Amino acid sequence: MSAATLTESDFTKRDEPFSLFREWLEDAKASEINDPHAVALASVDADGLPDVRMVLMNGFDERGFTIFTNFESAKGREILASMKAAMCFHWKSLRRSVRVRGHVEVVSDDEADAYFATRPRGSQIGAWASKQSRALGSREELEEAVVAQTERFGEDTVPRPTYWSGFRLVPETIEFWHDRPFRLHDRVVFKKDGDRWATERLYP
């Protein structure tokens, strides 16, 4: 597939969007200076005001796009309230982006435990020490909490906190965007239609 265009065959030959996303993600892994898994995650608060932040996509397959987080954080509370979210990947080196919208499901405890076990020990300790999104009096307060949790667990395995788990964004639409001259960009959207995916081009 050419990096300069999104040809008709790139999507008309597919009956689902995941293979194309996988190809684009592999391209991004080879070309992005920073993390190709970085993604803007959008949710809404109780007043319907949109909220967006950069996170890391921790997993991807045909079920959807997975992130892990503190469920007591702002994004955790917002997503749990609506069980809907959106993502936008932007790979500047490739002049490509992918937008994903859909409903959200909570991953199983086994899946959350398995991912938590892969995290560096310092990140595991941090999950216990940080009251994510809540007011922090000083940096020293956070550092003291890290020390306290480090001493608490000693050499023992650090378990996953009950409030720390994963969300899977199950896509209803996935849009692929590629930069073209004079802002005449390529836009192709896959829309879930029952058990199948329908595709269409969009005006830029």
Image: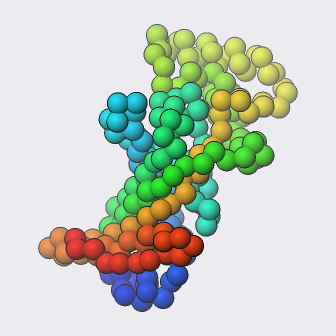
**Splitting the image into 4 quarters, where does residue 54 fall?**
top left
Residue lying farthest to the right in this orientation: 156
| Between 1 and 9, the one nearer to me in the picture | 9
Q: Look at the picture and state if 131 lies above or below 7.
A: above
Q: Look at the picture and state if 172 lies above or below 159.
A: below
**Splitting the image into 4 quarters, where does residue 121 fall?**
top right
Q: Position of residue 170 (x, y in %)?
A: 55, 57
Q: Position of residue 25 (x, y in %)?
A: 50, 67
Q: Quadrant of the C terminus?
A: bottom left
Q: Position of residue 67 (x, y in %)?
A: 57, 47
Q: Position of residue 125 (x, y in %)?
A: 68, 27
Q: Residue at x 67, y 16 (%)?
A: 147
Q: Quadrant of the N terminus?
A: bottom left
Q: Residue at x 43, y 65 (%)?
A: 174
Residue lying farthest to the front in this orientation: 194
Q: In this figure, which colouring scheme has been used for the structure?
A: rainbow
Q: Look at the picture and state if 156 lies above or below 39.
A: above
State left or right for residue 162 relative to residue 98.
right
**Splitting the image into 4 quarters, where does residue 182 fall?**
bottom left
Can residue 60 be seen in this snapshot? Answer: yes
| Between 2 and 7, the one nearer to me in the picture | 7
State left or right for residue 166 relative to residue 30.
right
Can residue 23 be seen in this snapshot? Answer: no
Q: Residue at x 61, y 12 (%)?
A: 144
Q: Look at the picture and state if 46 lies above or below 113.
A: above
Q: Residue at x 56, y 17 (%)?
A: 142
How many labels, in total? 0
